[in-house]
Structures are given as structure tokens and as C-alpha cells.
Image (spheres, grey):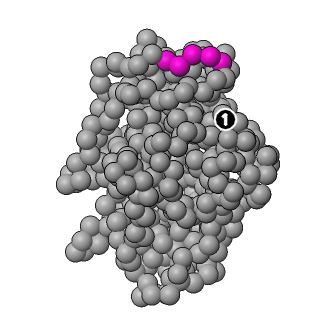
Amino acid sequence: MMASHPPLAVMRLIAIAGGACALAAWSATCTEYDSSLLTYSHFSDASAEDGSSPDAPTGDTALPDALPDALPDAPPEADAGQDADTGTSTPCDPTCNDPSLARAPCPPAMPDPPDQAQPLVFAMHSIRAGMSASAPNDWKTIGLDLDCLFTQSNGSPMQCKPLTSTTSVVADGDQGRDNSFGNNLGGLIRLMEQFNLITTDVEQQWNDSLAKGGTGLLFEIDKFGGGTDDPQVLVSVLLSRGVYDPTGTTQLTANWDGNDYWAIDRDSVTPPQNQPKYVDDAAYVTANRVVGHLPDGLPLKFVAGSGLLQVSLTNSVFILDLSQDHQHIVSGVISGVWYTSEAVSALDAYAAQSGICPDTPQYAAARGALSKASDIRVDLKPAPTLDCNGMSIGMAFTAEPARLGAVVDPPIPNPSLCGDAGADAN
């Protein structure tokens, strides 16, 4: 049985920007948010398009009445039959040589050492996403710089043309960290907490669930020489359904002694050998920092009590800071970009599963708020005359030693409650 999870109302979270009274009218209570159900499933690689877009919304603070019919640069159609990208490039960019920016280090210049016998396996133990009311500026310290720019609160310099005149929407965090997700969506959650629409700290409840051994991510580091540097290692990312007995039958509470068996979501592996789907075979280790990237279009999945919100990342980078003895991930980060058009579609799908349909009056404001969070081009190329078509995301975490458990079935998403109106939202 699944562990209980903290309350969160994603729709009301976004609608609060248009007024707390209208927000509260949607529902008297918050939905429940599964604390850390994050996983990846493969889509075809995203590619930049011609940059055409609708007119940008106007006004410093007003939300648009409705989202435009088309958003700039929609991603290509997904190809479910395509094999997962195993990674052939490094996230290090030697052309961006500004040491003041928070960027991934480059790989070490050394021969590949012999591999140690056993891979390292870690389970996510804590998470930060910039959503805690007790730390309203935490988002500024989460994520990485993705575009080699440090956008200030005045909106300059910008990689692309924002869809709003409110420059604080597109401002970077510390050291140029691109994290519109934490700045804007996290800000709405914090505002809900301040208005007591959420009565507990969302991030704290996420972490409480993780501490008990709830659903989260697993990281396996293989082909590692065991030293402080290694020019090529293999990193696999798996979704775990949490701590179970070795057969995957009974869910248990985590002991965090390295002997817990973490059940693997079947969507994370390829049958019949159950090999990990999502790997980077060109990751590397520099000064005990494991650096790599994830295949384009692999989404993080957030499961709420009444629906599923899928965040699809492109041009993502991860850094896993290992302890000196390599027994802990003392600090990890995943940073990437979400197509704004995909974000709106994901919001539509979640809303339909939650019974919030396209004809709900406040829903246009919710969609408009999300569209205004665009702060970056998905291809990361400088294009100051083209509309921003993506929303940057950063998430920080720690992880502890774990054992890979049995493969179990994934949770079944809830159907749309809006009939045909919401069935094709995603």
C-alpha cells in the first residue's frame, strides 16, 4: 500500500495569482501530493523550430484572460518506440568560461581507470524545490546556469524575449541559476501557505514521506574506478515505488542502513532482462562530482491524489556530489528546461483528472500564469528577438546507500473527469 502524502492543490496554486477568493471557490480542501514520485519515460529528442509565436501578454501584473491558441515552438511528437538516448555528449561547455556562473565542471583529462567490482546505488533521501514558505528565496540556490547568462531583476541580459513585462518572472537565481519553476510556481505555493490555503509546509511533508521510504529516484553509478576522478562512468536513473520486502510484495519503512530494498517501477526498465532504460554512458567524475545528462524529453512525474502532472525535461544536467568515502550523495541537482506548450498540456491533463475542466472560469487564469513563466529557449541558443518557449527547472536533493529491489507495476493514472473536453488535454 502506498504511503500517505502531503496536500497540494496545483490548480488553486496557480489561480491564486488571480485572487485568493476565486482560488478558494474551486474547492474547500487541497488534493494530496505524492511527495516524490519522480520518474522518466522516453520521448524523441526535442529540436528548435522557427521561433514564431503569438503576441506576448501585456501589463505588469495582470493575468491574461486566456492562453493563446498557439505557444511558441511546440515540441515534436513523441515516439514511444524509439530507444532511450544513452548520452554521447558532455554537459560541460568550454565556450562558457565565466567562473561566476553555477555550471557543471568539465571532465578530467586522464586515462579511464579500471572499474571497481560493484556499482554504487543510492536512494533519494531529501529534496528541495524552492516551495517552502519558511525559505522564500531558496529557489535562488537550486539548479544550474543553463544559458551562460546571469539575468538580473531588471530582465537583462535575456537569452530570449519573455512573454511578460514583469521582469521578476525571468530573473535568475544566485550565480545565474535558471529556475523559473522554483521562482514562479514555487512562489505560488508559498503564497498559498501564507494564506493558510495549505496548512503545512509542502516541502517538509515531501521530505517526511521520503524519510519513511516513500517513492523517489534511484541512482546507480557503474563502471567507476573509485577515485576522485574518472573520465567516463555509467549512470542509470530509476523510479522507485519505495522500500519493500525483497519480493516487492509488502511496503516497509526505511531503515537507511544501506540494506533497504527499493522496489523499481516497471516503467524504468526494459523487459525481459529488466535493464535500466534511462542511462548516460558518457557521465564522468571530477573531484568526487558525478556529472551527466538525461535524454531529452524524459519527464518527471508528480502524482497527486486525483491526478498526474508530468514535467518533461530537455537539455537536462545532473550533478551528484559524493562524500569522500563515496557512501553518500551529500548534494545533488537536476536542472533542465520544460517546453511551455508541454507544460500547459500537462496542466490540462492534470486538471481533467482532478475534475477541473476547460470550461471552468478560473482555469484560463491558471493557464495564463503558467505561460508567463517562460524564461528560456529550449535549445539554449541565444535568440533575444525570439519568444522564450521554455521554463527552466532546478531541483536539489540528497541520497543514501540502497539496494535495488524487485520490479513492480507502476501506479495507474486516473482517467479524465471531463469527458471529451479533457480527454485529449495531454
Q: Is residue 301 visible?
A: no
- Against 55, residue 199 (above or below) is below
User: Which residue does the image show at 46% across and 23% down from the upper left?
Assistant: 388
- Residue 277 position in % (x across, y down): 31, 61
- Residue 411 position in % (x across, y down): 42, 70
- Residue 349 position in % (x across, y down): 42, 50
Secondary structure mainly formed by the magenta segment: loop
**As drawn, is 340 to the left or to the right of 266?**
right
Which is more toward the observer, 268 or 325? 268
- Please name the amino acid that badge 1 sits on: Ala
Q: Is residue 376 visible?
A: yes
Q: Badge 1: few (under 14), some or many (20 or more) residues near its Cα, within 10 Å?
A: many
- Residue 338 position in % (x across, y down): 45, 39
Element assignment for label 1: helix
Q: Quadrant of residue 164?
A: top right
Magenta span of residues: 56-60
Asked whether 59 falls inside the magenta stretch, the response is yes
Which is more toward the observer, 268 or 413? 413
Q: Quadrant of residue 21?
A: top right
User: Which residue does the image show at 47% across and 29% down from the upper left?
Assistant: 67
- Against 373, residue 223 (above or below) is below
Asked whether 84 falls inside the magenta stretch, the response is no
Residue placed farthest to the top in the image? 385
Which is more toward the observer, 83 or 320? 83
Residue placed farthest to the left in the image? 81
Q: Which residue is mark 1?
A: 17
User: Which residue does the image show at 50% across and 29% down from the upper left?
Assistant: 66
- Against 143, residue 264 (above or below) is below
**As drawn, is 168 to the left or to the right of 136?**
left
Total number of numbered discs in the rendering: 1
User: Which residue does the image show at 37% across and 27% down from the upper left?
Assistant: 70
